[in-house]
Image (tube, rainbow, N blue to C red):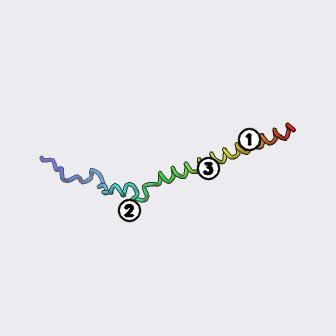
């Protein structure tokens, strides 16, 4: 009995052909935005940067307050 290689019924679903631009979030992809991970990374980096800036500002304020208190006690 010969093997029927043309009939692949039941082996697996057909894959939808998606362009490279579609995979990268370009128009015509139909899969939704592919840069959600990049957006999440950008917002995470932004929030971390803001938190670091806030910590630096509070540290600078504390050191400037310490400097002024030392100058006041020296008089």
Q: Residue 63 carries which label?
A: 1
**Disc number lying in front (2 or 3):** 3
Q: Residues within 10 Å of mark 2 (few under 14, many from 20)?
A: few
Are the two marked residues, 3 and 1, in contact with CB atoms closer than 8 angstroms? Answer: no
Q: Residue 27 carries which label?
A: 2
Q: Is mark 3 on a helix, strand or loop?
A: helix
Side of 22 relative to 2 (left or right):
right
Q: How far apart are marks 2 and 3 (CA)?
A: 33 Å
Q: Where is residue 38 in the image (x, y as percent from the top left)?
A: 47, 52
| Gap in angstroms between the C-alphas marked 1 and 2 | 53 Å
Along the line of sight, which residue is nearer the eye, 67 or 9? Answer: 67
Which numbered disc flags the more N-terminal residue, 2 or 3? 2
Disc marking residue 45: none
Q: Which residue is drawn at 54% across and 52% down?
A: 43
**Callout 3: few (<14), some (14-19), or many (20+) C-alpha neighbours within 10 Å?**
few
Residue 52 spot, x, y in % from top left: 62, 45
Q: Mark 3 points at which residue?
A: 50
Label 3 and label 1: CA atoms lie apart by 20 Å
> Considering only vertical position in the picture, is 56 above or below 6?
above
- What SS does tag 1 mark? helix
Secondary structure beneath label 2: loop
Circle 1 packing at 10 Å, graded few (<14), some (14-19), many (20+), is: few
The earlier-in-sequence mark between 1 and 2 is 2
Tell me which corner region of the image, top left, top right, bottom left or bottom right, holds residue 31: bottom left
Q: Which residue is drawn at 70% across and 43% down?
A: 60
Outermost residue, top direction?
74
Q: Which residue is drawn at 51% across and 52% down?
A: 40
Find the residue positioned furthest to the right.
75
């Amino acid at each position: 009995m010969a093997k029927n290689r043309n009939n692949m019924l039941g082996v697996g679903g057909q894959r939808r052909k998606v362009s490279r631009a579609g995979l990268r979030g370009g128009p015509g992809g139909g899969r939704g935005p592919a840069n959600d991970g990049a957006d999440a990374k950008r917002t995470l980096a932004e929030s971390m940067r803001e938190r670091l800036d806030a910590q630096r500002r509070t540290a600078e304020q504390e050191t400037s307050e310490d400097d002024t208190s030392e100058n006041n006690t020296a008089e």
